[in-house]
């Protein structure tokens, strides 16, 4: 069994630190002579190679909280000191900051979610941290044997589904009837107990845009997403979500969240997103916030259609060009993974390793997949300011001639050099929902899908897996490579 204690007291072992580097020769630890007392973990990082032996290592595969989706780019390390608690609220997290608590040994998961952490101290009560952004699991290895590998079980390497298992980011989700972002997050395995109203204390706070309700007590317009939990929800039957307009009204309200997710409402609805709200969202992202938005939430980046100069964010408008009037009648569309961006090749390998069929037999990569309910509002991106991760090629589209950046990413503030930026913004023109629905209203009407009754229970589709990859990636630190 592996202890779930976040930081054990190290058992002092009196093995000699026989090198000036603080490391000792490999071999049977019991054969070492007792010398001066040594409690640093580095004293038990044995030089196995000099004995012709393999490194002391632990290995495993890191999964999303659902226990099935393998994750790329997750840090796995033995900390030098207690990492301590994660800071609450938005933070300027840059990759140059290093790992919290430092590290004696560190690695990252590959495109198959796998890791081999070498040069692990061979002793008792060895702390291990598994982390990407504010997703963090800490375990203690009761004993690590020298000069051999110790595989870890899936239950030990899966990101936490609730706070009893570790740390989760604080997430805000604004629902929209034209998409169902909340269902993607739910299906990634976060426990129901963590989905609450803004005052419910969970790690995922639910909001709905009340401005989309029709006046005079009429049923909500089709754009309004689900606005309450179902009658059996742990957080309270029919508990009503917060108002999205209070969420994005000020930087202060946004800054309590690590990730803000805005689900398509079927319209830009500029009246509910005044310039003051746009400025607040930009300030949030500039300070280190992560923003994940779909389809008609393009207003935050491209500005209000027809009034971009007076209702928008010029700095963000410069990252892409938009075609708000583009047709969107196809049920599905072939989309391409852009392998020219730095993480593109790893993205393509990861898709294949997570069950999306390879494009060319034997290539072990997925560079093309079908998107259901494609949209085409993002026409192109400015490569010096943003990255295109998935796109529609007009020569390969059906029908031909369709153009779209399906997934657009950029870091903020754009006014600073890339290595000095803090936040990340994702825009997706492909709906997350893919079989899930989101709507509010009187029970029994077409709009009544209290969460999570509208969420699909099938396997994640290719586009959902693609967006899951990006969802976890935007949680990670900001670097010159997104």
Image (cartoon, rainbow, N blue to C red):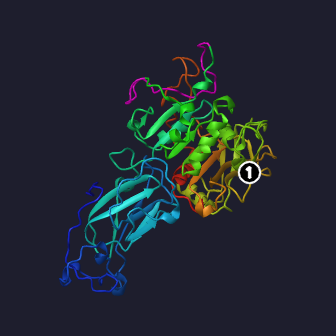
* 134 up-or-down from 141: above or below: above
Instruction: Report the residue marked by disc 1.
Output: 318
Quadrant where the C terminus is found in the figure: bottom right
The residue nearer to you, when weighing 388 against 410, is 410
Q: Position of residue 146 (x, y in %)?
A: 29, 75
At x 50%, y 60%, the residue is: 73
Quadrant where the N terminus is found in the figure: bottom left
Specify whether residue 439 is in view. Answer: yes
Give the dominant element type of the magenta stretch: helix, strand or loop. Answer: loop
The residue nearer to you, when weighing 326 against 51, is 326
* 41 up-or-down from 407: above or below: below
Asked whether residue 385 is drawn in magenta, I would say: no
Relative horizontal placement of residue 464, taking residue 98 as reference (left or right): right
Residue 439 occupies quadrant: top right
Relative horizontal placement of residue 288, taking residue 120 as reference (left or right): right
At x 48%, y 51%, the residue is: 69
Q: Position of residue 255 (x, y in %)?
A: 51, 44
Residue 262 occupies quadrant: top right
Magenta part of the protein: which range? 216-237
The residue nearer to you, when weighing 346 against 88, is 88
Specify whether residue 362 is in view. Answer: no
């Amino acid at each position: 069994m592996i202890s779930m204690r976040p930081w054990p007291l190290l058992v002092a072992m009196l093995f000699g630190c026989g090198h000036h580097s603080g490391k000792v020769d490999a071999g049977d630890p019991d054969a070492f002579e007792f010398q001066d007392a040594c409690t640093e973990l580095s004293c038990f990082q044995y030089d196995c190679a000099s004995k012709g032996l393999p490194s002391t290592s632990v290995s495993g595969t890191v999964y999303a909280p659902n226990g099935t989706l393998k994750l790329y780019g997750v840090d796995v390390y033995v900390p030098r000191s207690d990492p301590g608690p994660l800071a609450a609220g938005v933070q300027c997290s840059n990759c140059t900051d290093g790992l919290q608590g430092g590290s004696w040994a560190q690695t990252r998961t590959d495109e198959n979610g796998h890791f081999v952490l070498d040069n692990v101290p061979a002793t008792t009560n060895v702390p291990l941290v598994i982390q990407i952004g504010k997703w963090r699991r800490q375990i203690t290895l009761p004993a690590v044997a020298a000069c051999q590998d110790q595989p870890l079980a899936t239950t030990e390497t899966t990101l936490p589904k609730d706070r009893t298992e570790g740390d989760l980011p604080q997430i805000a989700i604004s629902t929209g009837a034209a998409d169902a972002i909340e269902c993607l997050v739910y299906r990634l395995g976060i426990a129901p107990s963590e989905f609450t109203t803004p005052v419910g204390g969970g790690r995922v706070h639910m909001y709905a845009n009340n401005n989309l309700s029709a006046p005079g007590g009429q049923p909500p317009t089709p754009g309004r997403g689900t606005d309450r939990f179902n009658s059996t929800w742990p957080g309270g039957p029919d508990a009503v979500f917060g108002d999205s307009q209070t969420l994005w009204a000020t930087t202060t309200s946004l800054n309590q969240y690590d990730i803000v997710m805005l689900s398509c409402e079927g319209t830009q609805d500029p009246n509910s997103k005044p310039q003051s709200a746009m400025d607040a969202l930009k300030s949030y992202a500039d300070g280190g916030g992560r923003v994940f938005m779909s389809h008609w939430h393009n207003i935050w980046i491209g500005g209000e259609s027809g009034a971009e100069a007076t209702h928008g964010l010029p700095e963000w408008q410069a990252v892409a060009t938009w075609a708000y009037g583009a047709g969107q009648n196809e049920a599905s569309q072939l989309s391409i993974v852009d392998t020219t961006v730095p993480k593109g090749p790893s993205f393509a390998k990861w898709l294949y390793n997570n069950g999306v069929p390879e494009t060319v037999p034997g290539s072990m990569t997925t560079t093309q997949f079908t998107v259901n309910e494609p949209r085409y509002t993002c026409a192109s991106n400015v490569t010096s300011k943003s990255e295109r991760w998935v796109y529609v090629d007009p020569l390969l589209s059906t029908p031909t001639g369709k153009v779209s950046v399906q997934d657009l990413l950029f870091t903020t503030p754009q006014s600073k050099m890339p290595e000095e930026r803090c936040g990340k913004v994702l825009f997706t023109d492909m709906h997350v929902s893919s079989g899930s629905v989101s709507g509010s209203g009187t029970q029994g009407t077409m709009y009544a899908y209290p969460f999570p009754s509208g969420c699909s229970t099938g396997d994640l589709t290719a586009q959902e897996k693609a967006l899951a990859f990006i969802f976890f990636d935007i949680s990670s630190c900001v670097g010159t490579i997104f």
